[in-house]
Structure formats: C-alpha cells, structure tokens
Amino acid sequence: MRDGSGVTVIEHGKLVSGTGAEPADDSTVVVKDGRISFAGARDAAPAIGPEATRIDATGRTVMPGLVEAHWHASYFNITVLEDLDIAHPPETVSLHAAFNARLALECGYTSARSAGCLFNTDVALTAAIDADLVVGPRLVPSGQEICGAGGLMDWNPEFRKIGMEGVILVVDGPDQARSAARKLVKNGAHWLKTYPTGDAAAPGTNDHHTLSMTYDEMEAVVQVAHNHRRKVFGHCRATEGIKNALVAGFDSIEHGTFMDSECLDLMLEGNVPCVPALQFEYASVHYGPDFGMAQAVIDGHQETLEAGAESARMIHEAGGVLGMGGDYGFAWNPHGDYAKELSFFTDYVGFSAMDTLVCATRNGAQIMGLDDEVGTLEAGKLADLLVVEGDVLADISILEDRNNLAVVMQNGIVKAGTMAAFTSTVVPAL
C-alpha cells in the first residue's frame, strides 16, 4: 500500500487521538509523506510552509481511522446459513469481498481483521489491497474457519456429499485439527479462526451452551499456529468453551458471552482481548423476525445479547482489552452498518463515547498487532485518520452515516469522504 507524498495540514478540528487523552478543541495534525509528524493543540504546532495542502476541520472531529476487528469480507446479505457455502461460486464471492472492502473504507474503517472468509478470499484480497489494486481497509486475513465434526458450522447433510470446504475445515480429533491449521498457515492465514462453541443460530443441536470442539483439538491448532508465529481466535459463547480457549493459549476471544470470574482472571492474566460483537445480537432480536428467523433462535439471541453485554461490562471494568466489530453481512445486520456497534456500546452497554472510540481504534490496532503503526494519532504513526462532521464525543451515532465523513485518509492519502474531490492527495477511483 503506497504512502502519500508531501505535506497535509488538518487545522482547527477537535482532536480525539484514540489514546483516551482529553481532546484538543483547536488542533493541528501534520501529515508528511504518509505519516503523522505532529498531532496536538494548534498553538503548539510547528510552522508549516505555504506548499502544504490544508484541510479546514472547523466544527469537525479529527480521529483515528476505525478498526473492524471481526470482519467477514465475503458475507453478502446472508439470510440462511446455507448461503455461506453453496449460494455463490468463488468468483462471485471474490467480487462481493472487493465490494465490501471499498464500502468498509468509505465507512471510515481503515483497518480490519478478518474473522473467516469463504474460499480463502481474504488472503487474495489482502494482497490486492496492499498492492493498491483494491481500495479497502488494511487487512489481516484468516481464510477458512475450523470447526469440529457435527459442530455449529458443519450443517450440510452427509448424504449430499458436498462437504463444507467453502467456509470451514471440519476436524475430528487433534490430528485433523493440526492438519487443518497447517493447511491454513500454508494458504496464507495470519489469524486462525475456530469454533469452540455453538450459537443461538442452531438451537436444536449446537446452541450457545454447547461445545463444537474438544480441548485437545483447540490446543493442537494453537501449537501449529504459534509455531509459525500465527495467532488463534475462537467463537466462544459457552463458559466452558471460553475457559478451554484461554487455557489452550488462544490469542483472542470472540463474543466471550457467558463469562465468569475464572474466565475473567484467565483473560486478564494472559492479556487476551475480546471482541463481543453485540450489535449482531441486537439486530437478530429486533430485525430477525422480518426475515423469518425462528422464535427459538430469537430467544437465544436475546439471551446472548444480555449475557454478552454483562460480560463486556465485566471485562471493561476490570481493565481488559475490548475491540469493536462483528458479523456484518447478514441481511438483518448488513455491511455498511459497522458503526452501529459503537452506538450500541454507548447506548445499551453503557460505555462512554471516549471509551468506545478507544476500543474501536487503539484496541483494534493492538488486536491486529499493528498498534506500532496505526490506531492512534501520534507522531511517527501512519496517517490513517478521519475528519468527521460534528462532535463524535457528543454524539457517536454520527459515525453511522458515511455522509458525515468529510475525509477518510489512509497512509496519508485521502481515499474517501465528502471532501475527497477537493484535496490534492485523493486516490483515483477504480
């Protein structure tokens, strides 16, 4: 991904750095050759020559680019689980993923961690974004997912003999788990996604209180991943599944729905982050009926919504690391709605806007392993930033409408936003 060139100065905006520090109401951010050279109060800014491109951020918030920490690039208006693996061929899925990548960037998400992608499309998508062939968030790929035989994601009937290879690798025992992990590493995955537990989507056999992998299978995946300097994360709702994942050495917990004190202690001891993905649960409860979702599934999502919110509060109050994002791409929770997660955490869970933004910027970059480069507006870091109409700390919901994004900058290049046509650093449209 190429860096911008020259100097850009963003002046007079309300600077929210992503570090959690108090905002600077009249700020200056200086971007030089794709990196931030200064970010702070305007009266402390260095002198800048007349050759710089200047952006007036009066009445606007200047903040880091957002991080979608649980992103499914290839999900496209899913209504039933079968849409995930047999509805479209790989060629169509690739187009869906490229479309969603541009949409995510236009929504202010300059970085994302893949949480599973059909046909390993995200590996190719990552390379295309890095080579500037596709506009999208800087991406960490995960490829296909791993699930135990007969578990949550293994739904195709045996008599069809079509397998599940589009979306997951089915494993039965630690040897097969080890083989699946090696295959994903070979194919380019950086984070290996697993399914330690079930979900409300499968109330009959694999609900949110059941396990979809054994501890030995989970540990085998971790051994392979860590040997190759890769990381492992897992869809964890049931308490026992969360504990198994933490003891096995998982690097991130997705959802973390039914936490208890033992889970919390293990999480804090290992500094393991969690991405709750709660807007999906809310959307399932409130909009699922419009898409024919069964009442048993809706009831399960209501339970996971309430328990997940309580677990998120528990982790946050204890000083744990939380990221924002999750499971967009379903018809009732579509791509483009990413920032609804941020509104949900302030309105429903009870986080302050500042704490939510830290989770969605600094913490997301930390989870991706890119916190030395992005996630906060500090000197030396890549210039991934947003200029947003209005005061985000006063009303975080303004991030839900991409028309409120005046500038979306990535690597010092303005790639989207209503002001993009008026800056000299804008990237050409594809």
Image (cartoon, grey):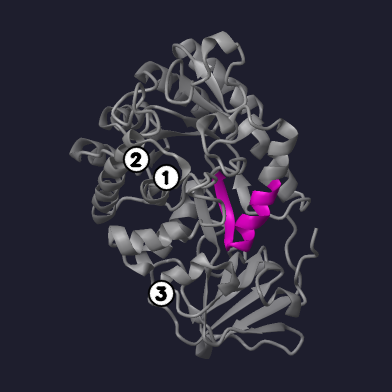
Visible in this render: residue 256?
no
Left or right side of 11 for 249 = left
Which mark is first along the chain, 3 or 1?
1
In the picture, the quarter occupied by the C terminus is: bottom right
Q: Residue furthest left?
A: 261
Per the model, the C-alpha gap separating discs 2 and 3 is 30 Å
Question: Residue 22 or 407: which is nearer the viewer?
Answer: 407
Per the model, the C-alpha gap separating discs 1 and 3 is 27 Å
Asked if the residue under mark 3 is in contact with the one under mark 1, i.e. CB atoms within 8 Å, the reply is no
Residue 288 tag number: 1
What type is the residue that disc 1 sits on? Gly
Nearest to the eye among marks 1 and 3: give it.
Answer: 1
Q: Is mark 1 on a helix, strand or loop?
A: helix
Image coordinates for residue 78, horizontal then vertical, percent: 55, 40
Above or below, comparing residue 37 to residue 156 in the picture: below
What type is the residue that disc 2 sits on? Ile
Image coordinates for residue 391, horizontal then vertical, percent: 45, 79
Image coordinates for residue 369, horizontal then vertical, percent: 52, 47
Which mark is first along the chain, 2 or 1?
1
Left or right side of 174 for 429 = right
In the picture, the quarter occupied by the N terminus is: bottom right
Above or below, comparing residue 223 to residue 354 in the picture: above
Asked if the residue under mark 2 is in contact with the one under mark 1, i.e. CB atoms within 8 Å, the reply is yes
What residue is rendered at 26% in x and 32% in y?
Answer: 239
Q: Does the magenta stretch include residue 112?
A: yes
Question: Residue 236 or 96: which is nearer the viewer?
Answer: 96
* Range covered by the magenta-colored residues: 98-113
Q: Is mark 3 on a helix, strand or loop?
A: loop
Residue tagged 3: 395
